[in-house]
Amino acid sequence: MSYKLRIRLAAQAEAARIHDWYEARSKGLGGRFADALEECLQSIQRNPTGLQIRKGKYRHDLVSRFPYRVVYTLDGDTVFVYQIRHTSRRPSKPFGP
């Protein structure tokens, strides 16, 4: 089955903010984050049911080599990405929109 990927505006903005933060620390590091995030999103799109449901209806996948995870849901043939979350910060903040 082929899945569509829809990234919420808040998640896009968070990804851009993270990219800029890494790029300000070291030239090229923001690009490496963007590449790792893209790999994660492609993996989710290929197999969105491969990860267990956590926190209600939400699933998450880790971004390789960076301390972030992608929080998403699956509705039919569409994957909705809600958040790009740091794995250590604000763990009590709820998932979702």
Image (cartoon, rainbow, N blue to C red):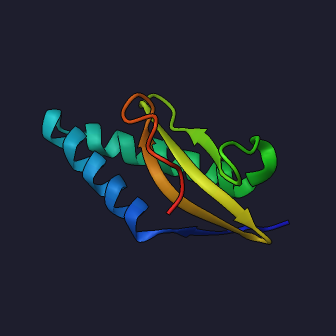
In the image, is 65 to the left or to the right of 54? left
Left or right position of 56 against 96: right
Residue 92: in sight, yes or no?
yes
- Residue at 14% from the left image edge and 41% from the top image edge: 24
Tell me the quarter of the picture where residue 14 sits.
Answer: bottom left
Q: Is residue 72 above or below residue 37?
A: below
Closest to the observer: 59 or 45? 59
Res 11 quadrant in image: bottom left
Quadrant for the N terminus in the image: bottom right
Return the residue nearer the eye: 85 or 23.
Answer: 85
Q: Position of residue 16 (x, y in %)?
A: 30, 56
Tell me how many marks there are: 0
Q: Give the residue furthest to the right.
A: 1
Q: Is residue 63 left or right of residue 28?
A: right
Q: Nearer the viewer, residue 32 or 60?
A: 60
Residue at horizontal 62 percent and vertical 44 percent from the top: 60
For the point 45% across and 28% down, which residue is it?
65
User: Residue 58 or 92: which is nearer the viewer?
Assistant: 92
Q: Say which quarter of the image contains residue 78.
A: bottom right
- The answer to whether one can see residue 47 in this image is no
Q: Is residue 91 above or below residue 38?
A: above
Using residue 4 as the reference point, say whether residue 36 is left or right of it.
left
Q: Residue at x 46, y 37 (%)?
A: 92
